[in-house]
Image (cartoon, rainbow, N blue to C red):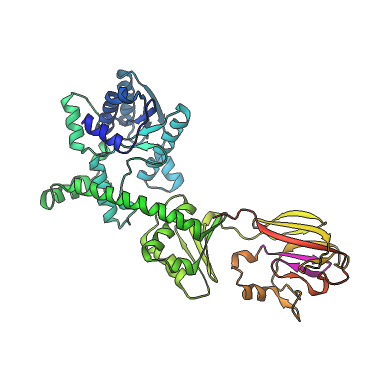
Amino acid sequence: MLERVAEFINRYNMLARGQAVGVAVSGGADSVCLLHVLAELAPHWALRLVVLHLNHGLRGEESDQDEAFVKQLAASLGLNCLARRVDVGLLRRMTGDNLEQAARAARREFFLDCMRQAGLGRVALGHTRSDQAETVLLRLMRGSGPEGLAGILPVTQEGFIRPLLGVERAEVEQYLRDRNIAWREDSTNRDLALARNRIRHQVLPVLLRDFNPALVGALARYAELAQTENDFWKCRIERLARRLLERRPPAVLVRADRLAGLPAAVGRRLVRYILEKIKGDLRRIEFEHVEQILRLAAEKSGHGRLQVPDVEVIRSFNWLRIVRLDQVRPPQPYSLNLDVPAELVLEGGLRLVVSVAEWNGEPGGLDLDRVPRPLVVRNWRPGDRYRPAGRDRAVLIKKMFQEQKIPLWERSGWPVLTGGDLIVWSRQFGPAAEYAAAPGCRRVIRLEVSDINTNC
């Protein structure tokens, strides 16, 4: 056991010499075994171990007894123990998550807090190869894609490691029995109302008996294959995202034709990448949600809108805008008096720079001496019209939006400059013909608009 775990740790570069490592111990067999194994291996890497225990408060006195057991175990090994109590039932009601999700989120927060406060470089978790097989089987039955079928990762970006992921649960329990090491039994592990327990106690035993006695290993190997495939795709999709995506906080933009033109496997992964960036996770995102977005991108023209869990997707002309639902807000009108020169930050994350200079004959500016006053910068309003330089008659700005294929979400905050009651300039469409710089102009007003937070 020790040699196999040490080899697994080295294979995935889980530990560095002299590192402080938190060991998550619930009191169950897996975590107790993990603690004893790491305690024996600690001198090899000169590790400083700290025991971590979260009391979920779900089983009353039984939970308290688990906490006392873990503290006593830590003391017997001469290790510090950091423990915390949380009301997972309350968290569940506050977040709307199911019990497993709320408990998982509470543990993650606890471990990350311990890493910050105790200076831990890693937190070791007790998942085994058996857990991996159950996870892959459960996700397969729920229709997960390749990312989900990668199962439990040996090492996460947050610094969580799983040294026992190459060891089956039966081996863990045998290791403890051989050494007369006690552990606690969690009564909820026998609750068949939980899907994972039905997989563990009902489904998997039948599959092992009647179909493949080596199924645990086969499922674990599948997860490993999926992990390496995902690692390859992750690098490729990140490069593709840098090329195709435009970040306009709080949204991400992508051209519909470019998304629709990707091979299906690439397009699906890019959509999932975008959704994860926007949401922070892929919870409740299903295959059909991804397909809906791809179908919206594949439409030949026009506008459309759809919602997937926590996310809104809008199609306007050849662009998709993807944003969290809680970041969607109605546009705020604005109207600002303008004294030139000036630099203003406008609604929608726009910066307007207004400068004055001697006219050098270049078109595009306003004649400082002829433009009417007062000058006011405001957002576009339905019905706005004027005659831009180069046109022979006044035209609705909305019509120019359509001509230039300006997406719907950019229009509400579109800056317009008025002089008195007249529109004298607007973004992209330029100065009004009546007030544009022309021969005889001495000084010119130039207006430049840029997006503050544009990045890819």
Q: Quadrant of the C terminus?
A: bottom right
Residue positioned most to the left: 210
Q: Nearer the viewer, residue 305 or 263?
A: 263
Task: Name the spot of residue 334 as percent of width and height, x first.
Answer: 72, 59
User: Is residue 193 shown to the viewer in this render?
Assistant: no
Whether 247 is among the magenta residues is no
Residue positioned most to the bottom: 392
- Taking 192 as reference, is 122 left or right? right
Residue positioned most to the front: 360
Q: Nearer the viewer, residue 90 or 26?
A: 26
Stretch in magenta: 413-427
451 vs 208: above or below: below
438 vs 32: above or below: below
Task: Name the spot of residue 267 as percent of width and height, x first.
Answer: 41, 63
Q: Main secondary structure of the magenta part?
A: strand
Q: Residue at x 75, y 74 (%)?
A: 388
Q: Residue at x 46, y 44 (%)?
A: 94
Q: Quadrant of the N terminus?
A: top left
Q: Nearer the viewer, residue 371 or 229?
A: 229
417 vs 75: above or below: below
Whether 419 is among the magenta residues is yes
User: Is residue 89 shown to the viewer in this render?
Assistant: yes
